[in-house]
Amino acid sequence: MFKDFKSLFVKTDEEEPEKAPAPVQDYSFPVNNSTPPNAVPPSPPVTPAQPSVTDPVIMEVLKTYESGLDSINMPGYDFYEFYQTITVAGSPTEQSYQMAYQMAKIVDKNVTVEKLMHDAEFYISKINEVHSQYANQGQARLNSVNDKKNAERTNLSTEIDQASARINQLREEMQKLEADIATKRSVLSKIDESYYAQEKTVKEKLSANDYAHKTSIDKLNFVKEGILKFIKA
């Protein structure tokens, strides 16, 4: 039933931009309340407050419902033709109902109140059926959108958390490096002092080595010169 019904929700990803809400007009179907035969038809029911949707959306769905009713119109004269006659009148009265019924009897002598009521229930059941399918498809589409939104939110939140954790890790590493630099600068500033004792010891030994060398050479040369001076060959 209703060939174009599925296309209301199954669309491409290139959705039309959202438009500002506009005042909603009353396009409601007459509601049958199982009026007993020969009773005066009740006044048109008060239309409940409409949701905040735009006129183009309302007109799109109403067009689908109306096309759907046309597509399931049963052969011959039945409630649907009677319904069309009454709705054309705009604001139906008891007289318009009586006249429409008399015209129906002229078109088809088999028309009765009972038959009209029975046919009305058929069309109402089909509208209810389509409404249920419409609601299920719409909810499925909404769930799909929400799933995608939540998945993207989760992914972005995870990436943000990971990036934040990495930043904190880098900050800790920077703090450790800065502390290490400060420690090494302190050691560097005292490096001469820390090696002073070792340098002094080495320098003293070098000086002593030079002194011992000179002393030894002087003694050896003294004896050598004495040999040459006092001993004849």
Image (cartoon, rainbow, N blue to C red):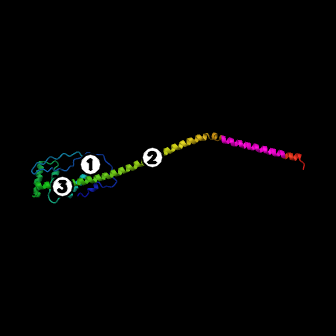
- Report, in whole angstroms, how far the alpha carbon at label 2 lies from the one at label 3: 62 Å
- Report, in whole angstroms, how far the alpha carbon at label 3 lies from the one at label 1: 25 Å
Q: Earlier in the sequence, mark 2 or mark 3?
A: 3
Using the image as rendered, state which of residue 118 and residue 2 is in the foreground. Answer: 118
* Magenta region, residue range: 197-223
Q: Earlier in the sequence, mark 2 or mark 1?
A: 1
Q: Is residue 219 shown in magenta?
A: yes
State the residue lying farthest toward the bottom. 75
Which residue in the structure is indicated by mark 3? Answer: 123
Q: Earlier in the sequence, mark 3 or mark 1?
A: 1
Dividing the picture into quarters, in which one does residue 69 lie?
A: bottom left
x and y percentages locating residue 217 in the rendered image: 79, 45
Q: Is residue 232 left or right of residue 118?
A: right
Using the image as rendered, state which of residue 33 and residue 81 is in the foreground. Answer: 33
Mark 1 surroundings within 10 Å by alpha-carbon count, few (fewer than 14), some (14 through 19), many (20 or more): some
- Report, in whole angstroms, how far the alpha carbon at label 2 lies from the one at label 1: 49 Å
Mark number for residue 165? 2
Residue sitting at x 49%, y 44% = 172
Residue sitting at x 37%, y 51% = 151
Q: In which quarter of the image is the N terminus?
A: bottom left
x and y percentages locating residue 70 in the rendered image: 20, 57
Q: In this view, does 206 lie to the left or right of 149?
A: right
What's the residue type where badge 1 is placed?
A: Asp
Nearer the observer: mark 2 or 1; the answer is 2
Which residue in the structure is indicated by mark 1? Answer: 55
What's the residue type where badge 2 is placed?
A: Ala
Q: Is residue 128 visible?
A: yes
x and y percentages locating residue 39 in the rendered image: 10, 49
Mark 2 surroundings within 10 Å by alpha-carbon count, few (fewer than 14), some (14 through 19), many (20 or more): few
Residue sitting at x 28%, y 56% = 7
